[in-house]
Structure formats: structure tokens, C-alpha cells
Image (cartoon, rainbow, N blue to C red):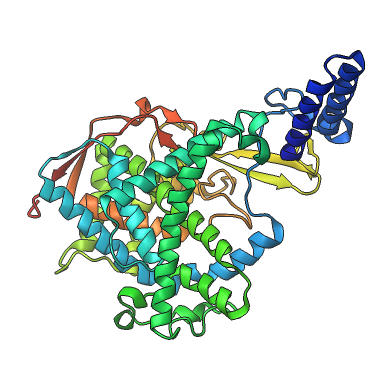
Amino acid sequence: MRYLTIADACSCAFTASARWSSTSEGYSSIAGVLYGLHYLVRGGRRGELIDKIPGPHAWPFIGNILTFLVSHGKKWHERRKILTPAFHFNVLQQFVAIFNEQSEKLVKSLCLEGDEVVDDLVHLLHKFTLNSICETAMGATSDLNGQVQNEYRSCVSKMGDITLYRMLRPWWHSNWMFKFSQKFKCQVRALKVLHGFSTNIINERKRYHDETGGRFLQGLGGDGDPGIYSFDDENVKGKGRPAMLDLLISASRREGSIDDEGIREEVDTFIFEGHDTTAMALCFTLMLLAENEDIQEKARIEVDEVFEGKKDEKLSMREVQGLAYLERCIRESLRLFPSVPFVSRHISEDLQLKKYVVPGGTIVHVHIFDVHRDPNFWPDPLVFDPDRFLPEQSQGRHPFAFVPFSAGPRNCIGQKFAMLELKVLVAHFLHNFYLEPLDFSRDVRILPDLVLRPSKPIRLKFVPRLQSD
């Protein structure tokens, strides 16, 4: 459904009403235009089929949804093809070292502060995830200072608020109309900060490749062979580490398949999605482990076995992959609190469901949060039980009953990256601290946002362990 076009037409109709309001002919014309628009959206075969499907009432003209300005068709496919090699096993293997480094820094900072209580868990975790995504996917080599991080986080939050504000107000769907809104000024200021942040990272990486004669870009892209990233750890340190951003720069310079604005769009997307969603997943995983002491201890025993006898506290890729119970804990947390609570898909052709037909041209919302708590698939759905993901308990479960990273061709390209990052940091926390709850998940109120977000800060107590325990 083309709501933006309809909103534009409605705005024209209301403008016309100012000129015609003195005549009955004007009112009749307006009524005719509005009826025509309503029939365009709700009438005909599509409207008839949609009305048969149970769901929330759709009001005339405005319906009950808003389309996002996201990548479509050919554009999305081309970008996905460029970026896919960036998340190959050989690349992710290099990133484990960075996750270890960032985890150790975070653990040390908590120990040095001396205060066991963290008053804002999400704020703490954002520091880790933002530094991690910038260093791994973007090739940045220095941690961001607190002021830059806080400003970036604040603007991400503002953009989420503005997006939802427009979703619920159809008269602001039109970009032309929205420019008259006070929120538009807020959006301009927020985007200036967000775009400036990503542009600085891009320019820094470009300068690096210029200074090194582009030798680290050689062989990138082309046929998309993932072997291009088969570097030895000893040869891949600091700025020489491969980054997702390198693929975009290479594609731009090699064949011009993406321009500077396109690079910035992808960087914006990955920095936002790569840090905010992961921070939320970490937050709820730690919170649920703190509430369930027996499960926390079982996960800690598995982690301690991996760390035992190590001179340093660095986990290898193989060791992280071997943390099977910890992974089940994270999956169960993502079931209860999926970082992205819903996704939308445009149905290009008629889709036959069991009892209903979804007509082509319709936008469908998949409410992941509700699917993950459906008792038809998850007995006692509110209970935190990692063993739901044991092979024997997963057998026969519908493959789309658990979709925290979406599914199908447009699934999350960074889901393996995210799971590695989550497992490494949680492992470091369990090895160094006992987690005790101060706030409980059952009491958390969720804000309406693009990412699952608590309405107020979440507190957690980190009690340092004596390594002789």
C-alpha cells in the first residue's frame, strides 16, 4: 500500500478545500476525491481479501501501518552481495580477538570502579558494543570517548522517537509535509550528528588505504570469493585487520557499484544495528541469568572449564563455539526479549495462508515478540528455560517459531557476528563476576521503539569472584 503517495494526495485535497470551502461544489469535490482515495486503498479485490483476515481495525485513509524508507529489490540485493564475504568464518575468526580485548577492558573498568552496582546496564553495554562494531566492521582502531558515545546514543534514541511519531501521524508521512513539523528540525540536528559520525569513520578508513597505496584492498570483492579474507593472525593487526567497510570502499573504487552516499547508508545501518540491538540482547541475557541463579551457575561451570589453565583470558574461536549451554541461554533470552520485536515485509504477489489469502502489494508485519511467546510452540512461554533449545526438544518445532534475526533471504546478515560477540562478553562476565538482580525482567516496561528498549534504566549487581573459588 502506497501510504506516502496517498498522504501527498490527501494534503493536496486539504489545500484545495481552503480555496473551495465557500461553495457546496467544493465540498462535493473534496468528498469525491476522498472517497476515491479510500476506494483505492480499501476497495476492490485487495481490500476485500484483507478484510477477511482477523486483525486490528483499519481506519479510512490511514489504515494501521506505515511503510519505512528501506532498501528494496535490486538495491538491497546488490548491497547484500557486496557485504556477504565480510561475515565469512575466516573474517569472524579475526573478530574474536577484538571481542576479547573489549571484554577485558570492560571487566577491568568494572573492577577499578569498585562499585558493584551498575545503575544503568544498557549505558554500560553500549560502550562495549559501539567500540566493538566500529573496530571490527569499520576498521577503527581507537575507542570512542565518552562524550562522542553519549551524543551518538542520544541521537539514535531521538531518531527512534521521531520515526514512531511519524508512524502514528499519517499527515506527516509525506516528506514534504513533514518539513513543516517541529520534529523535522530535531531530525535534521540528529542526522547531522549521526551522519557526521559515520562520515568521519569512512574518511579515516579511506585515508588509511590511500596512505598504504590500497594494498589491503587488492583482491577484495570481484567474484565474492570468501577466501580473500584468509589472513594469519600475526599478519592482521591494528588497521590491517579486514573490515566490512573495506568491501564497500573496494566496490566503489573498483567498479563504481556503490557511491559515497551508499557507503554511508550501509555504515549508518551497521553501526546502529550492530551496537544497539546487541546491547539490548546483552542486557536482557545478563538480567535473566542474574534472576536464575542455578542456570547462571551451570553456565559459569561451562565457561570456567574453558578458561581453566589459561595464562591469559582470551578465548579462541573454537572455544567460543564450544560454549553450547551458554549459547542456549542467549537464545532463550532472545526468545523472551528479541532485540528487534517486529519486522515488515512487502508481499509482491498473492500469498496463500491456511485459511486466508494475503493479496499482492500488501505490507505484512511479523510480530516476533508475540511469536516467541506463543504457547502453541513454547509451553510455559514466560519461563526462562535454556533447555528448550536442546536438539531433542527442538525436534519438530516450526523453523519460524524462533526468528530473532528474521529469516529467509532478508535475514540478518550479522547474526553469527552477533552471537560470537554476545558469547564472548557474557563468558568474561560469568568468569569474573557473580550476577545479582536489583531489577527483574517481569517488572520491565518496554518502550515502543524500533529496537526493544526498557522504559527506565536497569540495575544489576556485579560481585567480583575470587579466582580461587
Question: Is residue 9 visible from the viewing direction of this image?
Answer: yes
Identify the residue at horizontal 30%, vertical 74% (top origin). Answer: 238
Residue 321, picture quadrant:
bottom left
> What number of labels is visible?
0
In this picture, residue 28 sits left or right of residue 449: right
Q: Nearer the viewer, residue 201 or 110?
A: 201
**Relative height, residue 309 to residue 392 (above, below):** below
Q: Nearer the viewer, residue 94 or 52?
A: 94
Question: Is residue 242 visible from the viewing direction of this image?
Answer: no
Identify the residue at horizontal 12%, vertical 46% (top origin). Answer: 113
**Relative height, residue 229 to residue 83 (above, below):** below
Task: Point out the residue furthest to the right here.
Answer: 25
In this picture, residue 154 sits left or right of residue 448: left
Q: Quadrant of the N terminus?
A: top right
- Residue 440 placed where, x, y %? 31, 29
Identify the residue at horizontal 71%, vertical 41% (top origin). Answer: 363
- Residue 141 placed where, x, y %? 31, 68
In this picture, residue 291 sits left or right of residue 111: right
Q: Nearer the viewer, residue 260 or 37?
A: 260
- Residue 274 placed where, x, y %? 44, 54
**Relative height, residue 29 to residue 274 (above, below):** above
